[in-house]
Image (cartoon, grey):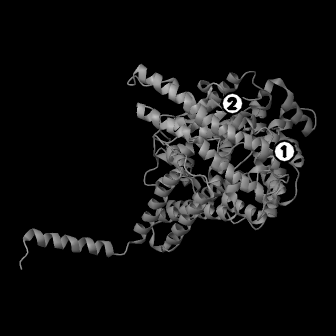
């Protein structure tokens, strides 16, 4: 029997394919497969992640928020982590090792949080599984009737999604894994605002107020009618059910204790949160963090006292704080004035960036008020990023609620932290980096991101801000605030501090408004460990800058250093230190 040339060629190709399939993957290929399969799983399991990452422009489901889903996801992460740990690190390149370490960091946290039942308590004092839903439409596209139809289908899934959330919250009530009751005072605004009688006044109806010209008037009318029905039968129905549960069961039944160590497995839970948020091995000694905070508080208070003397104020430290909190000259008269002041500071900062950074992002940012539904329980400001593919810019949110609690003397520090050179620069540049796997463009390491933001407040002095002694005192107030966090977070969760004790400590050491001291206290109680990230991260970044300056002398260039810090996106503190050490070695 003879073979044709075509048959021989086909047989040879088959052998080649078999050989390639049997060839062992290289460590680099193994890592790429783990990274890609993990990211693909994330996008399938979490539709909101796919939208916020700019990977999908329409979704028709919010995903599954059930015990079974959590178990399935954790089993997947365990399997992926085993594969990742089997890859010999020495065989990977430097950038690949960073990818592996950061993927390990995220999966280990997911697994530990599942083991410690963290998912049963998904609330902080101002957020929860329901608070991101009103912003979904900002990340979707509405070009065709089919896009609107998909959005309508999505709105109808709200009752099932929020029912899943309620089921887990009931289990949290049963086991004692709940948010502290005291931090939930006023929390009802986060859901009651969406229980409307007129669907056209719902934020979820926003996409139906404007249509592309390609959709006929008749079709627009049909979609509007369908949209109104979806808002009432989907969104309002879901939030009504959720709100009834919160009002009648969760808020009355939430725990009366404050500390994380009062939770089931509470000590282990708090230690794990310290590891995750600081990315340093500090979990075994919360008392050392507490003592570091006390040292920083003493140092900063001495600088604050020197500034009080500079202003010529005659009175005690506490009297000066009262003066700042009560004198009308330090407060905006209208929300628009506050937004204009913040915008002006932001544009001043934009002007100074080229002197301190070699690479700047293409993505712009805007300045906007914190949405009404969030503002009463929200911080003074926050940065809200956007996918690089989005038509929406990043936003620096300024809280215009209760203007008497939003002092102008802290606005420079707030703006430098939240906008530029702080979170916007860090976030936008991270998304524009080439060669990074997608999961890293969505990753946020608190000690890096918040440490960078606090470092940028300090950098503002070098950039020419804080020329007014009151504004400089505002800068120190913000730094003192973060130093106090080391004291009060560990105080709450390991030393039995009361809520009033924390409020008093913050109000006696900073010029923050009493409103801010109160909302911040509730945040620390409800979000164990996160508040540690700011000062721990800032101290590490400043330490690394000092190391580079000392090692390089005249060769040190602050623009190169800042570009280096932001060159790999968000990373853990050990990785950042390694990056700087390698830079110093190469630059000598």
Q: Which image quarter: residue 517?
A: top right
From the viewer's perspective, is residue 409 above or below residue 35? above
Q: Quadrant of the N terminus?
A: bottom left
From the viewer's perspective, is residue 488 above or below residue 285? above
Q: Disc 2, disc 1: CB below 8 Å?
A: no
How packed mark 1 is, by other alpha carbons closer than 10 Å (few <14, some 14-19, many 20 or more), is many
Please name the residue that numbered disc 1 is placed on.
506
Please name the residue that numbered disc 2 is placed on.
372
Residue 84 image point, x, y percent: 50, 69
Q: Is residue 358 something one can see in this rendering?
A: no
Residue closest to the far right: 315
Q: Is residue 301 something one can see in this rendering?
A: yes
Q: Secondary structure at mark 1?
A: helix
Is residue 196 shown left or right of residue 266? left
Residue 361 image point, x, y percent: 49, 41
Is residue 168 shown left or right of residue 56? right
N-term-proximal mark, 2 vs 1: 2
Q: Which image quarter: residue 31?
A: bottom left
Residue, x 46% and y 64% (percent of image)? Answer: 34
How packed mark 2 is, by other alpha carbons closer than 10 Å (few <14, some 14-19, many 20 or more), is some
Residue closest to the far bottom: 1
Residue 324 image point, x, y percent: 84, 32
Residue 553 image point, x, y percent: 59, 56
Front-lying residue, 296 or 572? 572
């Amino acid at each position: 029997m003879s073979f044709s040339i075509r048959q021989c060629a086909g047989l040879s190709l088959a052998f080649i394919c078999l050989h390639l399939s049997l060839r062992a993957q290289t460590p680099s290929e193994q890592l790429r497969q783990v990274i890609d399969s993990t990211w693909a799983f994330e996008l399938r399991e979490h539709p909101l992640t796919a939208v916020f990452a700019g990977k999908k422009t329409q979704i028709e489901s919010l995903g599954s928020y059930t015990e079974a889903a959590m178990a399935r996801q954790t089993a997947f992460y365990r399997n992926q982590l085993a594969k990742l740990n089997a890859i010999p690190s020495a065989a990977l390149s430097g950038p690949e090792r960073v990818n592996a370490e950061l993927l390990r960091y995220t999966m280990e946290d997911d697994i530990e949080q599942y083991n410690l039942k963290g998912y049963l308590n998904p609330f902080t004092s101002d957020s929860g599984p329901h608070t991101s839903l009103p912003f979904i439409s900002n990340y979707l596209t509405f070009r065709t009737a089919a896009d609107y139809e998909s959005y309508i289908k999505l709105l109808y899934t709200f009752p099932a999604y929020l029912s899943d959330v309620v089921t887990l919250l009931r289990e949290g009530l049963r086991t004692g894994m709940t948010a502290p009751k005291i931090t939930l005072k006023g929390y009802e605004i986060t859901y009651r605002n969406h229980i409307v009688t007129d669907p056209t006044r719902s934020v979820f109806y926003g996409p139906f107020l404007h249509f592309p010209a390609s959709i006929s008037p008749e079709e627009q009318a049909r979609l509007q009618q369908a949209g109104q029905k979806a808002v009432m039968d989907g969104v309002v129905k879901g939030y009504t059910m959720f709100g009834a549960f919160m009002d009648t069961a969760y808020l009355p039944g939430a725990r009366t204790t404050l500390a994380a160590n009062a939770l089931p497995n509470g000590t282990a839970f708090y230690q794990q949160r310290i590891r995750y948020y600081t990315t340093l091995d500090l979990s075994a000694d919360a008392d050392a963090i507490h003592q570091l905070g006390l040292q920083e508080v003493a140092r900063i208070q001495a600088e604050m006292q020197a500034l009080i003397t500079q202003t010529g104020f005659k009175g005690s430290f506490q009297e000066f704080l009262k003066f700042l909190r009560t004198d009308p000259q330090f407060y905006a008269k209208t929300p628009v004035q506050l937004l204009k002041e913040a915008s002006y500071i932001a544009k001043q900062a934009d002007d100074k960036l080229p002197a301190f950074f070699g690479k700047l992002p293409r993505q712009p940012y805007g300045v906007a008020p914190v949405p009404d539904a969030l503002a009463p329980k929200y911080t003074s400001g926050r940065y809200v990023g956007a996918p690089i593919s989005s038509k929406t810019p990043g936003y620096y949110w300024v809280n215009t609620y209760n203007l008497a609690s939003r002092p102008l003397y802290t606005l420079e520090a707030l703006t430098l932290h939240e906008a530029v050179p702080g979170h916007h620069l860090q976030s936008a540049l991270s998304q524009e980096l080439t060669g990074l796997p997608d999961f890293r463009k969505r990753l946020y390491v608190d000690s890096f991101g918040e440490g960078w933001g606090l470092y940028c407040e300090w950098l503002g002095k070098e950039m020419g801000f804080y020329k007014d002694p009151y504004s400089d005192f505002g800068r120190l107030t913000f730094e003192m605030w973060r130093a106090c966090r080391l004291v009060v977070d560990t105080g709450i969760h390991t030393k039995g501090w009361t809520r009033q004790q924390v409020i008093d400590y913050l109000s006696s050491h900073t010029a923050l408004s009493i409103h801010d001291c109160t909302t911040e206290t509730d945040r620390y109680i409800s979000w164990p460990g996160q508040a540690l990230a700011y000062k721990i991260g800032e101290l590490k970044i400043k330490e690394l800058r000092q190391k580079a300056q000392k090692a390089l002398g005249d060769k040190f260039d602050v623009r190169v250093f800042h570009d280096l810090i932001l060159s790999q996106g968000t990373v853990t503190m050990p990785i950042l230190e390694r990056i700087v050490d390698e830079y110093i070695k190469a630059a000598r």
